[in-house]
Image: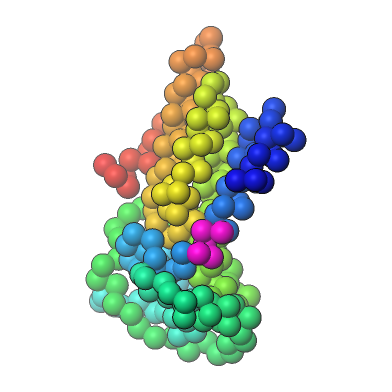
Amino acid sequence: LLASFFLFAKLGNNIEKVFLLCVLMLGIAYMTVLPAESAPDEDRHIISAYHLSNIMLGGPEPEGSLVYFREKDLSGLYGEYPNGHTYVSMYGNFFSDSPGENYVLLEKDFIIQTPFWTYLPQALGISLGRVLNCNGTVTILLGRLFSLFFFAGVTCFAIKILPFGKNILLAVSLLPMTMELAASYSYDSMIIALTFLYIALMCRLIFAKEALVIQDIVLPAIVLAMLSPHKY
């Protein structure tokens, strides 16, 4: 809160920069305070993102309702209800060296059936952690971090093009529930960001544009096509 007052004092005329700094600070704080699996249905979202990471890396994909999961990445999952022991384990595991590439099979009967781009940011983060041979805690955090980066980038662009009400969109995007989802594996991170962008595009067309050009039709159509399959 103190940081946001400072940022407004220094960057008050540039709402996008204020948002970007605030969302990254708060998002990383939420990632730390609310560890993996604590967000709504995050266990399912993690499995779904990991499944996409396996496809991206060309890893073995068994038949049936199973998915390969690096055994050491299981140490990055801390359950739905964190406690004191959770944070002690997170701290220790973050700096641990976990050699080996052993895989285990996990049930994926609850994998979420959505288009591939739903979990693309999270899967890219997981894949980076696996390629760099990071430990489980860092790998799972990278998936969350990439989700946060996507949310921050898309919402920042939405605030930039919004012709009015920039402070309102900034405030809504930094609400606790919004931030919890933005810094998680939940596909709501992408849904909220794309919704903000679609609203901003429509407001710009209605209130700021005097004449339509082809990209004014194509861009909102693409955003809506990406958004609609998730919560049709």
Give the color scheme: rainbow, by chain, secondary structure or one colour: rainbow
The spot of residue 148 in percent (x, y) is 53, 53
The spot of residue 112 in percent (x, y) is 30, 60
Residue shown at 24%/71% (left/top)?
A: 109
Residue shown at 58%/35% (left/top)?
A: 157
Question: Which residue is the extreme one toward the right?
Answer: 10
Q: Which of 163 and 102 is in front in this view?
A: 163
Q: Is residue 217 above or below residue 228?
A: above
Residue shown at 60%/46% (left/top)?
A: 1
Location of residue 41 (image quadrant): bottom left
The spot of residue 178 in percent (x, y) is 44, 47
**Is residue 127 something one can see in this rendering?**
no
Determine whether, in the image, residue 229 is placed left or right of residue 54.
Answer: left
Q: Nearer the viewer, residue 46 or 7?
A: 7
* Chief secondary structure of the magenta portion: helix
- Where, quadrant-wise, is the C terminus in this rendering? top left
**Is residue 76 something one can see in this rendering?**
yes
Bounds of the magenta span? 29-33
The spot of residue 67 in percent (x, y) is 35, 76
Q: How many labels does the image show?
A: 0
Residue 192 painted magenta: no
Q: In this view, does 94 lie above or below 215?
A: below
Residue 30 painted magenta: yes
Q: In this view, does 104 lie above or below 127?
A: below
Q: Nearer the viewer, residue 146 or 114?
A: 146
Residue shown at 39%/65% (left/top)?
A: 38
